[in-house]
Image: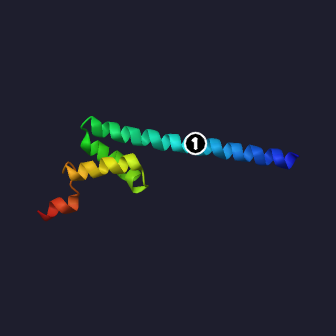
Amino acid sequence: MIKQRFYNFLIAALAVAGSAVAFAADSAEESCQQLYNDGRYASAYKACKPLADDGGAIASFVMSNLYARGWVVPARMSARR
């Protein structure tokens, strides 16, 4: 009986912790997108790059727009010109 209560508590605690992590990631991606929408492209790049590298969908979309429109050029590419 005590063992079952402990397992129920553990499952509930893990569910809450997982949802808190997902909420933090969502708000970070939303701030990344807001920077892009405000035209702050350098700040958007800095905020979105690590999120996109971790597989964030919104951040990856923002990064693709930054590169496609030429608003962000990697330093190693600009040095070649």
Q: Amino acid at mark 1?
A: Ser
Whether 20 is drawn above or below 57: the answer is above
Residue 69 screen position, x and y as percent: 19, 49
Left or right, 25 with reference to 76: right
Left or right, 10 with reference to 21: right
Residue 48 screen position, x and y as percent: 35, 47
Residue 55 screen position, x and y as percent: 42, 54
- Between 35 and 56, the residue placed more toward the observer is 56
Residue depicted at 26% across the width and 48% down the height:
65
Residue depicted at 68% across the width and 43% down the height:
13
Residue, disc 1: 19
- Between 58 and 27, the residue placed more toward the observer is 58
Whether 61 is drawn above or below 37: the answer is below
Q: Residue furthest top?
A: 38
Q: Residue furthest bottom?
A: 80
Which secondary structure lies at badge 1?
Answer: helix
Q: Residue 20 falls in which quadrant of the image?
A: top right
Q: Residue 17 falls in which quadrant of the image?
A: top right
Left or right, 79 with reference to 59: left
Which color scheme did the rendering employ for the protein?
A: rainbow
Residue depicted at 35% across the width and 45% down the height:
47
Residue depicted at 88% across the width and 46% down the height:
1
Q: In what quadrant of the picture does the C terminus appear?
A: bottom left
Marker count (numbered): 1
Q: Residue furthest right?
A: 1
- Circle 1 packing at 10 Å, graded few (<14), some (14-19), many (20+), is few
